[in-house]
Amino acid sequence: MKKAALFFDRSYVDAHFCFTELAKHLVENNFSVDLYHLANPYNPPPVFYDDRIRVFSFPLSKFQKTEFQTKIRFYKDYKYSVVFGTPVKGVWLAYQAAKTQKIPLIYLADEIINPKTKHFAGIDYEKDKKKDIIANKYAAATIALSEKRFQYQKKINVLPDEHKYFVIPNAPAGSAVKLKSNYFRDIFNINDNKPIILFIGSINWKLAKKIFEDTKNFKNKEYHIIFHGRSKNQMGKEKHPFIKISETPLPSYLINYAFSSADIGLALYDKTSVAEAENGETGGKIGTYLKNKLPLIAGNLDVFHTFEEKNVGVFWDGNEDIDKIIKKAISKKDVMTENIPLFFEKNYNYDTFFNPFLTFINEII
């Protein structure tokens, strides 16, 4: 059996379908997978319930790195056919393994490390960015989350025109389906039929923080707003008089079930923030909402006008009264929901975009 190693220096792998779907799709196509991730007390470890996927802690200490290097050099159980890595530490570890074992490296660009904006925490921009560029140029191919993102990455990492790349969105696989679920209604004891407006993320996002503040005087409305955090204690200790706060991170196998219990999804990225403008278009919450047939309230990147043009969402400029925008979305909800399956299939379904990449992988290993 072919074997792949996925080096993800990320703490909450289960929150990102670009990670979990890759592991599952490789296994479904006759690979075994070793997945390395950053363990922490605030997020659950990735769970797959598949003995073909082994999960390891990412090597960080000097001892752990030495132990890892020994294993990939001398242990048969750690011989791989291909390795994948996320920038920067993940892809550098993958680069070392690829060089040692003389196997292909795939650069998974879930983030773009821009030394000018420096929005990515925990790296040395002078030293680590050089490693990032070396590994990206060495890679047999890059997985980018959108065409626009790759062109930006190509410029930042000075990639040659002939560099191979595949666009695979950060979204779940399968058709857009709304599961029968009362998850949020059950945990918050919501007994009415009012629509649930869901935001997944943290209040560190500018527009999320704006909604959090602007709704403090809300009383009884014809809808509920729920903020679902990706990490324990991420939402802070402040109680909100209107917004319900869900602070329990979910394993990947429960995400679609939980989010299907909502009615509309908030995709909040502010174009005045460089980091949000760079990454918002490929945010995992967008594909996840659409997978579960939740129409979008999207603000305020220019590219998000597409959702309203395709009638699967409502654009929010970030300044207009959010109550007015939510009511507009509710009034159009049924029509937008009907339009989602075709839009999702064309633009987000992981299956659709993975197949050309699989053909490539099978050709080079």
Image (cartoon, helix red, strand yellow):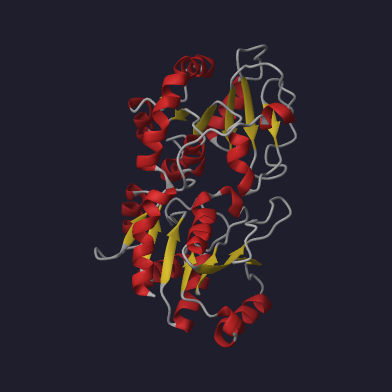
Q: Considering only vertical position in the picture, is 70 above or below 286?
A: below
Q: Considering only vertical position in the picture, is 355 above or below 191?
A: below
Please state the horizontal and vertical placement of residue 245, each as a whole percent of the image: 69, 31
Residue farthest to the left, as pictured: 161
Q: Nearer the viewer, residue 220 or 175?
A: 175
Instruction: Let me know if residue 87 appears in the view.
Output: no
Quadrant in the rendering for residue 311:
top left
Please state the horizontal and vertical placement of residue 172, each as a whole percent of the image: 49, 46
Q: Residue at x 73, y 31 (%)?
A: 187
The quarter of the rendered structure image containing the C terminus is bottom left
Q: Residue at x 67, y 32 (%)?
A: 183
Q: Considering only vertical position in the picture, is 136 above or below 327?
A: below
Please state the horizontal and vertical placement of residue 32, each as a whole percent of the image: 54, 69
Q: Residue at x 45, y 40 (%)?
A: 175
Q: Considering only vertical position in the picture, is 363 above or below 15?
A: below
Compared across the picture, whether 106 is left or right of 234 comes to: left
Please state the horizontal and vertical placement of residue 58, each as a whole percent of the image: 62, 67
